Amino acid sequence: MAVTPGVVVAATRSGAGKTTIALGLMRALVRRGHAVQPYKCGPDYIDPAFHGVAAGRPSYNLDHWAMSPPTLAALAAGHPADIAVAEGVMGLFDGTGGRGATADVAAAVGWPVILVLDVTGQTETAAAIAAGCARYREDVQVAGVILNRVSSPRHLSLIRPALARIGLPLLGAIPRDARLTLPERHLGLVQASETTDLDARLDDFAAVIGDTIDLDAVLQAARPSRASGTAVGLIDPPGQRIGLARDSAFSFTYPHMLANWRTRGAEIIPFSPLADEAPPADADAIWLPGGYPELHAARLSHAAHFGEGLRRAAARAVSIHGECGGYMVLGQGLEDAEGHRHAMVGLLGLETSFSKRRLHLGYRQARLLADSSLGRAGTEILGHEFHYATVLSATDPALVDCRDAAGATAKEGGARRGSVSGSFFHAIARRHD
C-alpha cells in the first residue's frame, strides 16, 4: 500500500490564519481532483468537523501528548489519499512540558511544515522569524512559507527578497480578504453543522487559496511519513451495542475513538437528545459526548423520552458515561448564562452554572478509581479539559484521581453512581508506556 505524503500547516501563534488557510487548501486540492486526508494536531473537535466538510472525509486528531508514537504513526498512515494536510495547534513549538507541540507531531510522523506568517505590520522581520523556526529544531523541516494578510504588492516586495536570501520558498501570499473568516463563540468556531453557508464559505476559501498559493509546490513539498507502528492504548469500547448521543448539543467525539470501537466489533447507534429520542433500548452502553448543552438547556430539560430512556437504562445497570457537556446533562441541574436553572436527567448529583463563567483548560492525567465505561479501576486515561462551567455542587464519589500535565493535582474528579459515570475531561487514549 502506498504511503500518503503529507504536510503540516503551522503558524507562529494562534490567530495567524492557519485554520482558514488549511481549510482553503484542503478544498482547493479537492476541487482539483485530489483525495485529501485531513488531520488536526492536538485536542480539538471543532476544527476537524470543518476539515471533514472541506475534504469530504473524516479528520483525525494527532495528539503527541496523549498518543503513543506508534499510534501517531498508525493514524498518519492508516488513511490512504493523494495528500494529507494536518492543521497545527497554537504556535509551531508551543506544547506542554516538552510534549504536544505541532513540531512534535511533524517530527514524529516525518511530514514537512508549511509555515503561515501573519505579516501585519512586518516586512523583513517576517523572514527572520521564518529563519528562526526553520533552524530551531533539526528534526523539523520547514518546506516553505505562506504569507497571510499582505497589505499590498509593495508590502510583499519588501518581504520576498528576504525569504529568498535565507533559502525558504515562498509558496503564496494572501492579501487581507474578508471572505477568509468563520463565525466564532467561546470555545472557538461555531460548529460546522451550525454554519448554514459552510460549503459556499469553503468554496470562497478555495478560490482565494487557488489564486494566491502555488498548489503544485505544496503537492511537491509533501513527503510520506517515515514512521510506522500499530495503534496502542486506545480506549476500549464500553459495550457491544453503544448508544451514542449525536446532534448539535452532543458533537464532540474523536473519530479515532469511534473507529477503534468499530474495529473492535462494537456497533454504534446514534440518537438525538435534541429530537427527544431515547437511547436504543437494547444498548448495553450509552455515551454522551461533550458539545454545547448550555445553548440547548431548556430543550434538553423538556426532552422527556430522552431523560426517561436514560433513567430506565440506569435502572437496568447499563453502562452510561458523559463527557463534559454530557456529564453536566447527567447531573441534577444546569444554570445557563442568564442564570436560569434547567433540570437535567438527575442520574448524578451535579449542579453546574454558566452564569459564573470560569475557564478550565489543559491536559489531564486521570487514574480511574472504579470500573467504568472508560476502563478498569487503576487504568490511567490521558485527556483534555476545556470548558467554562462552574460546579455549584457535586455529591457523588469521584471517578478519577486527576492531575494536570505537570503532575499537579487538578480539581476535576468526575463522578460515579452505580453504572453511571461522568467527567469534565475528554478521554483521548490510555497511558501506554
Image (cartoon, rainbow, N blue to C red):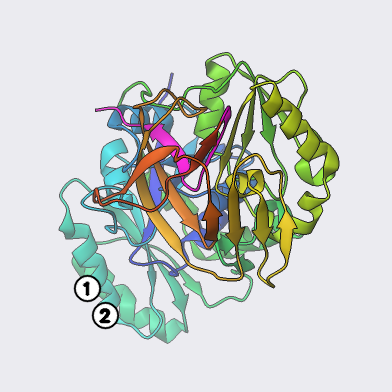
Q: Residues within 10 Å of mark 2 (few under 14, many from 20)?
A: some
Q: Is residue 287 magenta?
A: no
Residue pointed to by mark 1: 128
Name which residue type carries label 1: Ala
SS for dot 1? helix
Residue at x 57%, y 48% (from the top left corner): 51
2 and 1 marks in contact (CB < 8 Å)? yes
Quarter of the figure that contains the N terminus? top left
Q: Is residue 424 magenta?
A: yes
- Rounded to the nearest whole Å, what is the CA distance between mark 2 and mark 1? 7 Å
Question: Of 30 and 399, which appears nearest the observer?
Answer: 399
Instruction: Determine the image quadrant of residue 166.
Output: bottom left
Q: Is residue 372 above or below residue 356?
A: above
Amino acid type, mark 2: Glu
Picture quadrant where residue 355 is located: bottom right
Query: What's the residue at 43%, 69% (across, down)?
Result: 16
372 over 365 or under it: above or below: above
Q: Secondary structure at mark 2?
A: helix
Q: On the image, numbered disc 2 is attached to which residue?
A: 124
Q: Nearer the viewer, residue 159 or 329?
A: 329
Q: Position of residue 314 (x, y in %)?
A: 67, 28
Q: From which residue to which does the magenta span run?
A: 418-433
> Percent from the top left, x then y, of residue 433?
24, 28
